[in-house]
Amino acid sequence: MINYKLSIGDLLVSKEKDVTFTCYGLGSCIGLFVQDRTTGICGGAHIQLPSDSFSYNTSIGKYYSAQSAIEQIVNQFKSKGSNCLSLRAKIVGGSSMYGSSYDIGVRNIHDTITLLSKNLIYVAASDTGGKLSRTAFFNCTTGELIVRIAETNEIKVF
């Protein structure tokens, strides 16, 4: 089994079998996991910011915003043979960790779901909001998403 650890701004789409994606410490960030149920193509992204009104740098292969990450993930799925109508997404994160008036977590959730909807990608599961960080493990073979909340020792399976 290959395990890809996605750091902030990382994005990867794979046709390989037996792949997992892991996003550690998702506070206000979003862990986005997408699977094509027909072809088996799978992808993940660790999204930091809600929109491209914030700076990001695709020249170094980092997709910090929901807008740039979802655009890129859709393009990569298409280039690998997906028609994108059988894509299913699972999202994790978007916490309000710091009590900031910017509400980055809430805005990340909103923008991610809005952009997925615009691209006709169904959100099959989500564990978002709140005030605690999460670590997410997505198994591309089974489609299982495991979310661990360290502060409460809670484990959720989607």
Image (spheres, grey):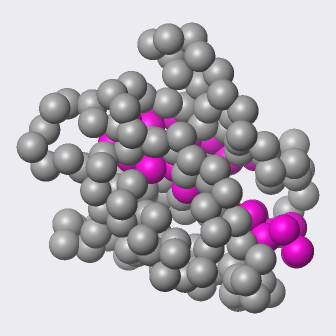
Q: Quadrant of residue 57?
A: bottom left
Image location of residue 151, percent across then percent down: 45, 13
Q: What count of labels does the image hold?
A: 0
Q: Residue at x 45, y 50 (%)?
A: 30
22 vs 78: above or below: above
88 vs 107: above or below: below
- Give the camera-side residue of 48 and 99: 99
Q: Find out whether residue 95 is within the magenta segment.
A: no
Secondary structure mainly formed by the magenta segment: strand
Q: Quadrant of residue 47?
A: bottom left
Image location of residue 60, percent across then percent down: 40, 68
Image location of residue 156, percent across then percent down: 66, 28
109 vs 27: above or below: below
Residue 46 seen in render: yes
Residue 62 seen in render: no
Q: Residue at x 49, y 82 (%)?
A: 118
Quarter of the image where the C terminus is located: top right
Image location of residue 140, percent across then percent down: 80, 53
Judge left or right: residue 127 versus residue 18.
left
- Give the camera-side residue of 12 and 32: 32
Q: Quadrant of residue 45?
A: bottom right
* Part of the protein shown in magenta: 19-42
Q: Residue at x 37, y 32 (%)?
A: 130
Judge left or right: residue 42 versus residue 120.
right
- Give the camera-side residue of 97 and 16: 97
Judge left or right: residue 43 versus residue 117.
right
